[in-house]
Structure formats: C-alpha cells, structure tokens
Image (spheres, coloured by chain):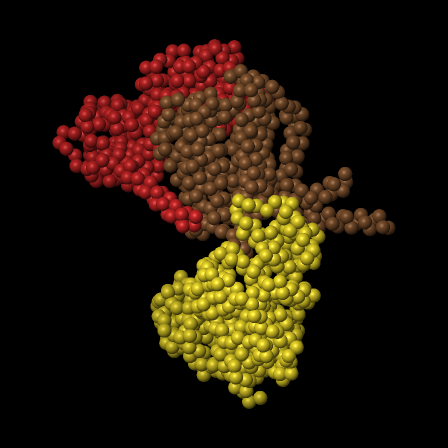
Chain colours: A red, B yellow, C brown
Amino acid sequence: MRRFSKVLSMVMVLAMVLSLCACGASSGGSTGGSAGGTITVGVVNNPPSESGYREANVKDMEAVFSKENGYELKAFYSLKNDEQLQAAQGFITEGVDYLLISAAETTGWDEVLQSAKEAGIKVYLFDRMIDVDESLYEAAVVSDMAKEGETAVNWLLDQKLSEYNVIHIQGAMGSDAQIGRTGALDAQFAAGTMNKVVQQTATWDEAEAKKIVESVINSGEKFNVIYAENDGMAKGAVAALDEAGITHGVDGDVVVMGFDCNKWALRELLAGSWNYDGQCSPFQAQIISDLIKSGKAPSSKVIINEEKGFDAKTLTQGDIDTYGLGE
Amino acid sequence: MQEECLLKLRGIDKSFPGVRALHNVDFTLRSGEIHALMGENGAGKSTLIKILTGVYQMDAGSIFVDGDAVSIHSPQDAQNKGISTVYQEITLCPNLTVAENMFIGREKSAWIKQRDYEKKADEQLKSLGIPARSTQQLGNCSLAVQQMVAIARAVDMQCKVLILDEPTSSLDDKEVNMLFGLMRDLKAKGVGIIFVTHFLEQVYEVSDRITVLRNGELVGEYLTKELPQVQLVAKMMGKELDELEDFTGDDTKEAVEGPVFYEATDLSSDATNPFDFTIRKGEVNGFTGLLGSGRSESVRAIFGADKVSSGKVKIAGKEVKISRPIDAMKNGIGYLAEDRKRDGIIPELSVRENIILALQVMNGFFKPISRSESEAFADEYIKALNIKTASSETPVGSLSGGNQQKVILARWLLTHPDYLILDEPTRGIDVGTKLEIQKLVLKLAKEGVSVTFISSEVEEMLRTCSRLIVMRDRHIVGELKGQDLNQAQVMKTIAGGEA
Amino acid sequence: MKSDSRKFLKGGLGQLAIPIIAVALLVIFNLIRDPGFFSITITHNNYGNAVLAGNLISIINGASELAILAIGMTLVTAATKGQDISVGAAAAIAGSVFVKVLKSGSTINGGTVLLAFLCSCLVAMLFGAFNGSLVAFFKIQPMIATLILYTCGRSIAYWINGGATPTVTSQILSSIGSFAPGIPIPMPVIIVIVVTILFKLLFHFTSLELLTQSVGINQDAAKLNGINTTFIKLLSFILLGACVSVAGCIGVCRLGLINHETLLLDVEMDAILAVAIGGNSLGGGKFKISGSIIGAYVIQMLTITLYAMKVSSTDVKAYKAIVIVLLVVIGSPVVKEKFRKLLQKRNSQKKEASAA
C-alpha cells in the first residue's frame, strides 16, 4: 500500500508537470518566416480558455486569417498585460505586416504601438479599446455593450406588456458587459416605465442566479420579466422557475432574456422556453480582413461591430448555425 | 582563595508553582577553568543556567561577577555582563555566512562595511583555530564547526563566562576533540567555562572541577582529579558509596530459566550502536545507565520506533522482521514510551478510546471494536488498575500523571503482550502509583510475560529486575545478575568498572 | 428544565452548542422579521410533480453541496491539521468529467449517468490522492499543497470539455438536480442524507474515526501505537475527493450545464467555515461530522436571509463575514473559558445567597 501510493504520487506529480507543459506549448504561435505574397498577421489575444466568447473569437481569427485566404497567422494568448506587451514587441521585431491586439489591460501600450508605427506596421484593435492616442492605430473594431443593452430593452418595450416587473441579474460588477447591459435597463427603472423587483449581481454564476430568483419566488413578490446579463445566469434563473412551477418563454408567464448567443441558449429560444438572446459578437476578423484587403484607410477610428438580438418567435436553425457560440 | 573568582552564586532559590527547582544552591567559577555542572534529570542544572543567563529571575540569593553583586534581568543583560551561552541546539542562522552569524545583531552602527567584518571574522577564526572561512555559508559547515562559530561569536562579545549546554551531544569523536581543543585554548586565555554534559568520560577528559546538583540542592563541589567516576555517579544518584556497599542480598532475584522469547543480534537503529539482547519468557530485565546513555534508544530499536538499520531478530526461535511499531505489536510486543505527553496519550480522546487504541490498531482497519465492547474493556481496566477518573468518557488529558500512565499501561495490557517494554513508567508520578506499577510488573512476569523495565531510580529496577543491562555512552558495558545485582555494582559498572 | 439548560451551556452538548445556538438565533431573527418566513407550501413544478417550496426548502436544498464538502473537509482537517482549498476547483474537474462522459454517449439513461458519476468520482479521488500524497509523503502544509490544484484546477476542467459551458439536458439529470417524480423533497437533500449515512456506516464498520482523531491529536503517539499515519492522511483526502465529486455532479445536475469558472466558486472557504462553525478545531483532532453539516446550513441560512432582506449580493459577503467572525469568536476557547468562569461565579454566588 505504502509503496503503491508513493509510486502513485510520483505519477500524479509527473502528470501535472506534463499537462502544464502541454498548456504552454498550445499557446505558442506558428513558425516564423513569411512566404512571398502572403500577409503576415500577428495577433495578441486573451487565451481561448477565458470564455466561450473568447473561444469563438480565436476560432474566428484562425478561420479568417488562414493560408487559403492568403494570410500567415502568428498568435499569442495571455491574460497578462506584460506578457502581451512582450509578445507584441516580439511580433514587431519579427516584422509582421499587421498587428491585431485585444489587450488584457487598457494601459501601458504607448511605447509598443509607437515602435510599431515606426516600423511601419499597421495596428488594429479588436474587442477591447486601449488608452492611447488614436494616431497609433488604424481602427478599433469593438462591440458596443451599451447598444446591446438598448437593443434588448427596446425589444422588451416592443412586447407591449401591461406591466414590467423585472428581476435583473447582473454580471460581475464593473465589467464592461455588466455596465453596458445594465445601463439601458436602469434608465427604464429611473423613468418608471419598468418596475425593479430586484437587482442583484450573481457575478456570472449560474447557481447564484438561481438562488436570487428562488428568494424572490419565496418572498411572494410578482414578476414577469427575467433580464439576465448572460446565458448561464438566465439558465440558472429558469431552473428556479421550473422548480416553482412558473411557466416561462413564449406563451409563458415570465419573459426570459439572456445575452451572448451560446448555441445551447439559442436552442432554448427555438424551443420557446426563453424569449430573447442578445448577441455579443466575437466575429471581428472578417471586418479587419476586409479593411486590410481594401487597402483604404477606414472611415472611422472606431468601428462598431453590429450586433443582433434574437427573438424566439423569429429565430431559425440557420441563425443558430451562423451566430451561435460554442460546440 | 588563591584563584580569581569570576562568578559566585550564593544561596540561590527558585520555585515554580508546585515545584521547588533550586534551594540554597552555591556555585563558584574561577577564571581559566572548565567547570562541569552535573546532575540527573530534574537536578536543577538547566534552571540554574537559565537564572545565570537572565531567562528566569531567582527568588532569593545573590550573584557576584568579578566580586560585584549584580542582578541579571534578561539574556541581553547577561551578555553585557560577560556571560554568554551556547546551547545544544545551534541557534544561529544556517543560511547566512559565518561572518554574518558572528556579527549579526550587534553592530553598533548599521554601516559597518561587509569587507571589514569579514576580515575581522577571519582573524577571530584563525586565532581560535576554527577551520572555517568567514564567507562560507554556515549551513554548509559541519555541526562541530557551527558549534565553534557559536562559541567564537560568544568569545568575540568579550565574554568572561562561557556556558556550554550539552555542546557535544550531536558531535562525533573527532569533532568532540576539536571542540575540546578550542575549550582548552579559551581556558588558557582566562575564560571561565561552565560545561554541562551527560557524558562522564568527557567530563574527566576536559574539566577541572565538578559541581553536582541533585533534586535542586547542591551536593558538593569537587576537583575532578580527586573524584573517582564511581563516586560521581553515586553523588548524582544520591547514594554514598559506603552506604551502598552494605546494601546487598535481600533484593537479589533468581535468574529466570525459561525459554528465550526475544533474541536480537547486532540490532541497531539510527540512534543506537549495534547491540545484542535476549529476554526469556517470564523474565524481567532492565536497561540502566545515565540519561543519554542510550537505554531508551535501545528499546525503541527493539520496538521498531526508530528506523532500524541492521540486525537479526528472533521471536520464540523464529526469525521475524520488525521495522515498524505495528510489526512489533503483531509479534506480541508492547511499548510504553518514555515521554508520556509526547509519545503516549492522545489527550483530547477519552480514557476509553485511549485504552482500546493499540488493540484497535492490531485488529485492523475493518474490525472496529464496538462501543459496548470498548466500554467493557475500559471499565475492566479502570477497575483492575484502579484508574481514578470521573468516567470512561473523560478526556485522558484531564487526568493526573499517574492515572494517565495507568491508562497507557491498560492500553498495552489489553493487547495481551508476550513482551512488554516499559520505559520510565514511574517518572513524574506519585509514590503510591509507582509501587502499584512495580507490583504489576512482577505479577505479569509470574503470568509468563517478559518485561523490560527502565527507570532512572535504580532501587526500583533492583526490586523488579532479575537481570540488568548497563549502558554508558551508547554502548552496553555490562550485564548484572544474581549476586552482582546491587547498587554498588551498578554504580561501578556505570562509572567504568573499576572503583 | 433549569438544570438542563445549565448543563447545555456548560457543554453538555459539547461542540454542537455553538452551531445550534447560531441556528436558533437565525430562526428567531427571521421569525421576528417575517413570521411566514419558514412556511412551506406545496406547488407543482413545470414537470407536473407536487413539490415542497419555501425559504426553508431553499436553505436546506441550497446547502447540499456545501454540506457534503464540509463532511470531507472535516476529515481532512481532523487528520492533517490543515484544510484543502482546492475543493471548488476539484469539483469543477469532477463536474467536467461527468459532463464529458455523458456527452460522449449517444443517449442519457440511468446507466450512463451512473457510469459518468463513477468516472467523475474516480478522477476526483485521484486528484484527492495527489493532494493527499503531497501532504502525507512530502509533508507539505495542506493549504500550500492544495494551492497547486486550487490554481490550475479550473484550467484542467476547461481542457476536459474544451468549451466554456457545455450543456447536458435530460429528465434524469433534472431529477437528480431538483425533484424526482413522486418525491416532494429536493433530491440534493436526499443525497446529503445518503452521504451522511454512508459516512456513519464507514465510521461504524471501520476504525477510521478513532484512528483519524489519534493522528490529528498526537501524531507521534499514533505512530508508536502502530498507526500508519501516512495512510490515514492520504485516505482523508481521497474520501474528500469522493465528496467533491458528489458535490460537483449535483451542481451540474441542478443547471444542466458545467461552467468551469463558476461551478462551486469560492466554496472552499465556506466549507472550511462550516467545519469551524460546527465547533471542530481547525487545528485537527476531535471532530463531529454533524457539527460541520449544521455549520453548512447556518451559512446557507445566513445567505438566504440576507437575500430575503434584499441586501445587495455584493454586500452579502461583508455581512456574512461579520456574522461568521462573531460565531467563530464566540466559539473560541478564550471566550468559552470566560463564559464558563462567569457561570461558575454566578453559581457560587447563588449558592452563597441560598446559604445565607
């Protein structure tokens, strides 16, 4: 027993080390050396493990900036700003043609972007803005989280409910997505068009969302809208409704709204058990590729990636295949 | 008085709640002498040293340094008065250099240049003949050198009195000689050294004078060359030799003639030298020797408590392998450890749980002793051993020392051992319980159980054992039985045979 | 009656006094605030089953994962004098394995769910063994040893499924995660009862309890009594691994999806707190499983109370901290001793008074 467990522990330690190495390797980029005619693109991004959004974002980048489309893609993924800065500097030294950045933090990039400009490398920001002078980059392709919120709230107003008693489940407080998606709804609460039953953060945690809704149900307060700032929390909220025997979705008593357009969430819409899902598009690659290929300077420094909101009544399987994230 | 008195202690008293640790103790240290401070456990050596170094405050008495009456309030205070101590456990920082260790915490200004004190350290090391460089990391030096660096640090602080508390306990012979060389050098320079050790031979090799304490009282101060070893042992143990010579006969036990139960050849552990040992069925034998002589380590090796490094063991004629306590237990051996608090009781568990523990472990993981069964066991032994406890569910930690010891005895008796090792079962418990335990040992032997009984009180062993194995400096130096089984002979053998 | 209450305060119930007092205080507080707070109603859920509902059910149901983890954490604490801070991350791994196995099959039925659970249990126990061997063989402090898995566990969970939030939908899973047809009590509650019974049986049919306590209180003595202390420590981590797996799978079944980032997030601190509130010493040794379970319910009751009071969930943690500090301080040996002395003094005064 003793012997065996000793061996076992060694094997486990070894396995851990190996798996960590594997992780390091997978984040490495492709090999250097740009072939004639192809455009070399260096991408500095957050790792796909960050979220479903990021995973789709990375996949999209890989698909658009492929060999077939005439690109050579070098990618670096990290959640740490200083590692990202180093990698960006590395890409500049290697001499890539374009540098695409989704920064971990908004500050500290001046020097790197300056040296890119001096080296004649064009910089595009995607998904996240950086605090630098506009002249240091070509354009930023970003989502407008506030607009996502507005789209969703406008959709909700269009439903012409006799009254709006809203359970508002927020994401991690202070995140861009939370601030953007909360803003539009807060305006309605302030204007009195909608009634705030409860407004709580579940910090993107599904189980916490379920507890929040459960607590409202137990208190006996009336509500007819659940506005959850991502799909997971909407799912947690729905679990609470199911347990309490409250109907939801199309033809149900409670309107369920989520964000992010995960494939599984859109399927809930298609099945009619949710009502609305707001897109937060990770697909910036095509827009940037179009700009690069057109050779023209973009008309504006900030390009808003147009985002949709899906209604359960009009959603099609095709939409799920095109816009759904994950799987 | 011809020699110059460095340090004089007169009429020192010190009590702790419930214990009088020192009573009216005198001590004198002259310049340029090595003075051994001797005594068995509880004699008051360490209390005296702690008073000298300012750790404790004495209740009564006076201390003179260079003839001036002083009072010592703290270790820092003691150092300022020229009294330095090097403890058994090295208290320096192994990850700093030798020079840093010598000077750390005592720079008058924080801006002493590194180069300067390295140079100073090297000079110091050279003058004391210590084989180390100032830039070496202390942890890379041998234990002896570390010990010597500690001494060098003390000497450099202009100490007049140097206290060495068991400095040799973790050194080998060669290292001990190096240390003695240094001690003699310091002596020649006029430093007075107080040397505390368990090793008799070292005392005779290096010391000039011996002061003996016993039970917190001064026995006397002697010139080393005028005090034979056997006399020293007798004084430490509290018997005058003449008195011992008369004491014969009555307690002598017949040697037991049963089959051999346990036999070890060349047995050794990390803590012992190889030794041979046998015990017969129904025999009571003892290991004796001064503290640190290796008696506990030997029985720990028998039980597999320390890592066994060599040896062949036969039980009832069959060769067995005992490398862990559970092996010994499965072969019918029980072991009551020397340190009841550290190695014996599980204080927060109940008397009942403490009693069944060893049996439960032997039964195995999947055969728990049921509640009712364990209650029956506990009640049986509480009654049999007359354990004074409110109930069998009382936490054992709240019992008196003697009753705790009985609980551990019960624990081993419950396993029905063929061979029971009792290491100091009578230490720190009341007289009544001591007698009960001795009677129990004899009763067990009559029932055919082999018992090894260790006690620092020789009378107890003479009363119970039919054979005594005498140890000195981690070697077996004699085996006494029959006619030889008397105090005088024990003392002589411990002290080195010839009186 | 009076002597009973005195015995209770003197520690007749021993270590359970504090958690039970905590429950009582919370119950009284809620009843004053809202007399109907604990009322239980019967409703029909969306699958047509008659089920119990109400705050009490929410509390007992919601604390299930925590209670199960607290059981395992109690054992680890008792044996190793330290805590496993990787249980949340390990639960994410266990849940991910559960989902991975379920998704690899074509259909989900009772057999595949059982298989998936067994796989998840095996993996979680292996990770427990990993933590345990760091502690038992390499003598690393439990909190430091488990820091490794705490840090990388959720990344490992991510690699298992590749996606952020894979979903699994099945009637069986929702039966496990909420209500089974015909049983009005939430299934997780029943699972807690089953796990508790299993542990009680384990204690009954093995000497684990005695050996674990001995190792935790006095390791040197335990060794000299022939106890394989390494094995006991390792075993405690492996058993915690099994608990982690059960908790992780319940978490998955509740929602039908696994989010490796949020599944049982920060649960390790709550589990350690449950052990402490249960009157168990975090320094190891004597333990009571029942105390830790009650501790888990105390924490959940506190959370639900705060939600019901519409305290913003960002503030909930701060309020929780205040209450927990109070509970832990009241349960500390210093306060207990003071209280005992006070009681003694009053008793003797009373005696004097009656004598006079």
Q: Residue furthest left?
A: A36
C219 up-or-down from B173: above or below: above
Instruction: Look at the image and tell me whether residue B99 can be seen.
Output: no
Q: Residue at x 58, y 70 (%)?
A: B256
Report whether A284 appears left or right of C242: left
Q: Which residue occupies the extreme bottom position in the image?
A: B2
Residue B382: x %, y % from top left:
68, 55
Q: Picture quarter containing residue B13?
A: bottom right
Compared to A122, does A153 lie above or below? above
Q: Residue at horizontal 44%, vertical 21%?
A: C170
Quick one: A135 or A230, which is closer to the camera?
A230
Q: Quadrant of the N terminus of chain C?
A: top right
On the question of residue A326 being in view, the answer is yes
Which image quadrant for residue A111?
top left
Q: Quadrant of residue C31?
A: top right
Q: Is residue A139 above or below residue B316?
A: above
Residue C277 horizontal/vertical position (percent): 59, 41
Taking depth in this image into account, of C226 and A122 the one nearest to the observer is: C226
Q: Residue at x 86, y 50 (%)?
A: C356
Please state the horizontal and vertical placement of residue A57, each as a whole percent of the image. Answer: 31, 27
Please tell me how many numbered marks the rendered image carries.
Answer: 0
Q: Nearer the viewer, residue A61 or A94?
A: A61
Q: Position of residue A34 (x, y in %)?
A: 16, 34
Residue at x-position 63% and y-position 48%: B374
